Image (cartoon, helix red, strand yellow):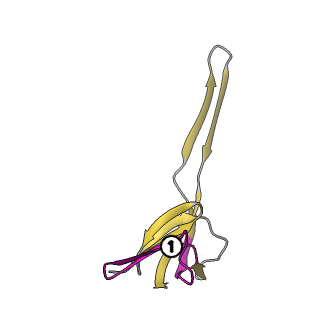
Amino acid sequence: MTYAIVETGGKQYRVQEGDTLRVEKLTAGEGETVVFDKVLAISRDGKVTVGTPYIEGAKVTAKVAAHGKGPKIIVFKYRNKTNYRRKTGHRQPFTAITIESIEG
């Protein structure tokens, strides 16, 4: 079993070949290939390689499956005794990717 730990969008993800996951929005269009070169660790057949902080020459390639927005989060601001109420919503954009290969 081969897996890697990749950093993108300020977050770290544990990925394997064939995985589909949601990451922070990327600029690549649907169907395009994305290469992640910030690989923190790779495990192959029980042997773990850890970078300092990244592994040189390692990369993970993925294909962009879709773009979308997450669930709506309600933001409600309220101050008592002043008739101050503000209700807004937020939907975080994301990119769904499918991992194709892990190299390095």
- Write down the residue under mark 1: 51
Q: Quadrant of residue 95?
A: bottom right
The amino acid on which the numbered mark 1 sits, given as a three-letter code, is Gly
Q: How crowded is mark 1: few (under 14 residues within 10 Å), some or many (20 or more)?
A: some
**Residue drawn at 56 percent across, 40 percent down:** 74
**Left or right of 1, for residue 73:** right
Q: Which of 76 and 26 is in front in this view?
A: 26
Tell me the magenta residue range. 37-66
* Residue lying farthest to the front in this orientation: 52
Q: Position of residue 88 (x, y in %)?
A: 63, 39
Is 47 included in the stretch rendered in magenta? yes
In the image, residue 22 above or below residue 3: above
* Residue at the extreme top: 81
| Residue in the picture at 46% in, 69% down | 21
Q: In this view, does 81 lie to the left or right of 46?
A: right
Quick one: quadrant of the N terminus? Answer: bottom left
Question: Between 98 and 65, which is closer to the camera in this rendering?
Answer: 98
